[in-house]
Image (cartoon, grey):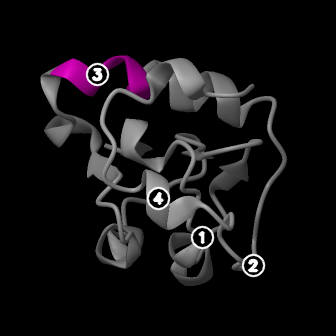
Amino acid sequence: MTYVVVESCIKCKYTDCVDVCPVDCFREGPNMLAIDPDECIDCTLCVAECPVEAIYAEDDVPEDQRDFIELNAELASIWPSITEKKDAPPDADDWKDKPNKRGLLER
């Protein structure tokens, strides 16, 4: 089983999770992160670090977010690795509680 970043990360892109990842499985896109399922070792460290609760075990991804399992794999294959925490976007706090951000995903 791997971990998956879901919709609530879009437009927030807090990178607290990156700092604790022992295997550098996070990939950075323009406005969200993804987890490379081939690199993730299921350690769970990132889950507690995410301030918007955007990381789930693959088996626990909410039904309406299940497409993010495949999306993480797809995006992880094209986005670069991120290995250090960065500042969140200046408007991240404005976006953290907003639903229905899927259409705002930038590839």
Residue 12's place in the image compared with 45, above or below, is above
Q: Earlier in the sequence, mark 4 or mark 1?
A: 1
Q: N-terminal of the two: label 3 or label 4? A: 3
Our reading of the magenta stretch's main secondary structure is helix
Q: Amino acid at mark 3?
A: Arg
Q: Quadrant of residue 29?
A: top right
Pointer 3: what residue? Answer: 66
Q: Report the magenta residues as a range.
A: 64-69
Element under disc 2: loop
Q: Which mark is residue 15?
A: 1
Which mark's residue is nearer the viewer, 1 or 3?
1
Separation (CA) of disc 1 from disc 3: 22 Å
As measured in the structure, the alpha-carbon distance from the residue carrying label 2 to the one carrying label 1 is 8 Å
Kind of residue at badge 1 = Thr
The dot on residue 94 is 4
Residue tagged 2:
84
